Image (tube, helix red, strand yellow):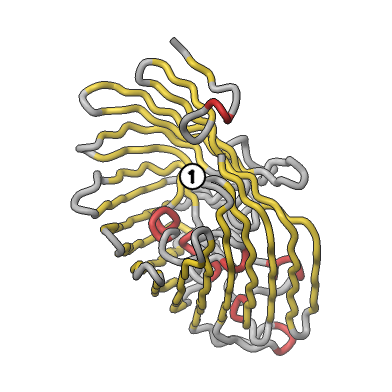
Amino acid sequence: MQKLCVSMALCTASGLAFAQAGTSVTLYGTVDGGVQYQSIKIPNVGSQSRTGAHSGGQTGDRWGLRGSEDLGDGWRALFTLEAGYTLQTGQHADTQRTAFNRQAFLGLGSKDWGTLTLGRQYGQGFLYFSGIGPFGNGFGLGSQSVAFGSSLVRYDGMAKYETPNIGGFTGAIGYSNEAGFGAGTAWDDTSATALAIGLRYAGGPLSAIATFDRLARVQTPANDGTGTLKAWIVGAAYDFEILKLSLAYGQDIDGRIAAGNTLLGSLGAALPAPNGRYLEGFKAHNYLVGATVPVGRAGKLLGAWSASDSNLDVPAPGGNGIATQHGFSLGYTYELSKRTNLYAIGTYLRNAAYIDDARSQEYRVGLLHRF
């Protein structure tokens, strides 16, 4: 008999669920809104600031459906369909894509044999690395993806296999032959291929990850489709109870594997290293040091420093030089319940996008609810 939870008060598990003899479909998502101040200044280019309401200040607003069916003998069929939206307007977060822009995949899974999925999926840099730093891949400019671009990437048409958990270790490998990030992003070349590999360990207070991403058949300045971009990340976090310490290091090689170009794009600046573009000989060393400190029963104080040091050695237009990008973030979260929390964060970015003396600031306060 099929059951429908028509009220969140009647649901005993997260989400609105439909269940029938070993089959379940769950509605889930986030609603995140607040107010913010943003500013950016680039010497010889211009400055810009704005204050007002924001959406997705801690994590991107989304809604989705997860489904699972018991096939017997420990096997199950599964799917996920997930879309982003903007709280302030109710609009789809990416008007140039079809309905489920964030995730859209199906697959087969087994506790003993692992999981095989096919469709639009996150790379392992997102799925594994997001739990290392205190701000993860959220909180705007505070996101660790500002320095580690490959930690916030989705690939179209990816076939992925993930192992079962073996002694705390999980591994995954994915491949796509049409690896565009999606229309309207920094890079949407569906002729390219992508390889994404990850290894994760989680046991007691220790978490550790290693990821590698490779994009091949990327267009070059000669337009011959022979470019290859690579990125790798290693990171770890250890929870001392009074303090959770996070450390990470990685490299971008021959370009940055990332899907956005930060606030600098709105000023029309000539970015020295546009995301998702082939740059022969380019290399960046990326760093993260972070800490999470419990405050009382429901609060957490978050802090992080990140840096991206590239080997770029060409002057930008207007006389701007090249410098190491540094980010400093301080934040606080307070849990009102298991699903709802308040947050505040301030971030200062120096030498943004490697442009010497380009400075950006962002301050946000808001409320996040998960359903």
The x, y position of residue 65, in whole percent, is 52, 32
Residue at (75, 59) in percent of width and height: 35
Q: Nearer the viewer, residue 183 or 330?
A: 330
Check the image and report above or below for 224 versus 240.
above
| Residue 208 is at least partly visible in this image | yes
Residue at (70, 43) in percent of width and height: 95
Check the image and report above or below for 191 versus 237.
above
Count of numbered marks: 1
**The N terminus, quarter of image:** top left
**The C terminus, quarter of image:** top right
Q: Is residue 45 left or right of residue 64?
A: right
Q: Residue furthest top?
A: 1
The x, y position of residue 360, in whole percent, is 69, 76
Residue at (49, 55) in percent of width and height: 153
> Pointer 1: what residue?
156
The x, y position of residue 120, in whole percent, is 48, 42
Residue at (67, 46) in percent of width and height: 93
Q: Nearer the viewer, residue 247 or 331?
A: 331
Tell me the element at label 1: strand
Q: Residue furthest front?
A: 296
Check the image and report above or below for 34 versus 244.
above
Q: Nearer the viewer, residue 297 or 79?
A: 297
Dot 1 amino acid type: Asp
| Residue 220 is at least partly visible in this image | no
The x, y position of residue 178, in whole percent, is 47, 45
Categorize mark 1 by other alpha carbons within 10 Å: few (<14), some (14-19), many (20+): many
Q: Is residue 260 left or right of residue 131?
A: right
Q: Is residue 342 left or right of residue 73?
A: right
In which image quadrant can residue 7 be found? top right
